[in-house]
Amino acid sequence: MVCGCIDIGTNTTRLLVAEPARDGLREVLALRVFTRVRRALAPDGTIPPPAVRALADVVAAQARAAREAGAGRLELVATALVRDAPNRAELAAELRRRTGLALRVLPADEEARLAFLGATRTWAPRPAGSVAVVDLGGGSTELAVGTVDGGVAWLRSVPVGSARLVDEHVRGDPPAAAELAALRAGAAAAFAAVRPPPAGLALAVGGSATSMRRLCGATLDAPGLAAALAAVTAGPCAEVAARHGLDPERVRLLPGALAVLEQAARVLATPLALSRGGLREGIILSAIDREQ
């Protein structure tokens, strides 16, 4: 059974096509486009018509690619940016017209549960005991704590993400010291009231989180986070991107991502391991489970 998921996020629109495998899923096709829709939003969060059309172009191309790759089932989902958009119904109508797909706008708690499923079911060896999953997005960050067998027992959606922080606090390239301090203060304020239960393992997922592998390896502890921040602010985005094999837009957002992950690691009181599975994997696994 080959399944696909197109995920419309704040920074990117991503496609994953995968099929069941012994360790969870085998990737058939993965595509990513930096759509940068957040930069085009009206003050009330409305997605302007040109951005709706551009987003529909991207989704239509990814839907064609998924079907050509053999996806027998294809889901289209959206998270914080569309969740908060007053004209999300108009976007959904345009996407259905262009692709034939119904847009599923995920509530924050469902997003957290699916990211937890994708992270824990693709992690080897199979996690024992309590696991925390930090799903870092551009507009929000979802935290979930639970077990593989019992599922999520605790979750929170924190209204802060990499794009939101950077857009609010950073103007320089690279960011100035005062701007980095403002990023960290903004993330700290957002997490001030977050009190998750203890977890033996903490996994970070999301596009910015997985980009960290090229900067500091597979585990984000305090020294690793500091080293990653120094690396991504060592020069203009274009230069840093070329040096580390990253997209310049991803480099622009990474200081905000690091500020959020620093706070997530603090409240969880444990370093974060970088998971290869997350929301899209969770959606595909959930679809496979329903068919079995």
Image (spheres, rainbow, N blue to C red):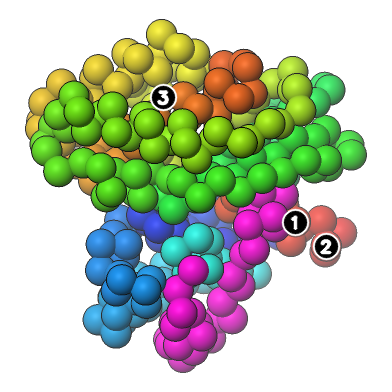
Which region shows up in magenta? Answer: 84-113
Q: Residues within 10 Å of mark 1 (few under 14, many from 20)?
A: some
* Residue at image location 29% in from the left, 84% down from the top: 49
Q: Which residue is mark 3?
A: 213
Q: Are marks 2 and 1 in contact (CB under 8 Å)?
A: yes
Q: For the N terminus, give its image quadrant.
A: bottom right
Report the residue at 64% width, 23% height from top. Answer: 268
Q: Which residue corresponds to mark 1?
A: 286
Judge whether 129 appears above or below 4 on screen.
Answer: above
What is the secondary structure assignment of the residue under circle 3? Answer: helix
x and y, in percent, of residue 180 in the image? 26, 29
Measuring 25% from the left and 81% from the top, which residue is drawn there?
50
Residue 243 percent across, percent down from the top left: 17, 25
Residue that label 2 marks: 290
Q: Could you tell me if residue 194 is visible in this image?
A: yes
Mark 2: amino acid: Arg
Residue 246 visible at all: no
Secondary structure beneath disc 1?
Answer: helix
214 or 173: nearer the eye? 173
Specify few, some or many for label 3: CA neighbours under 10 Å numbering under 14, 14-19, or 20 or more.
some
Residue 121 spot, x, y in % from top left: 73, 38
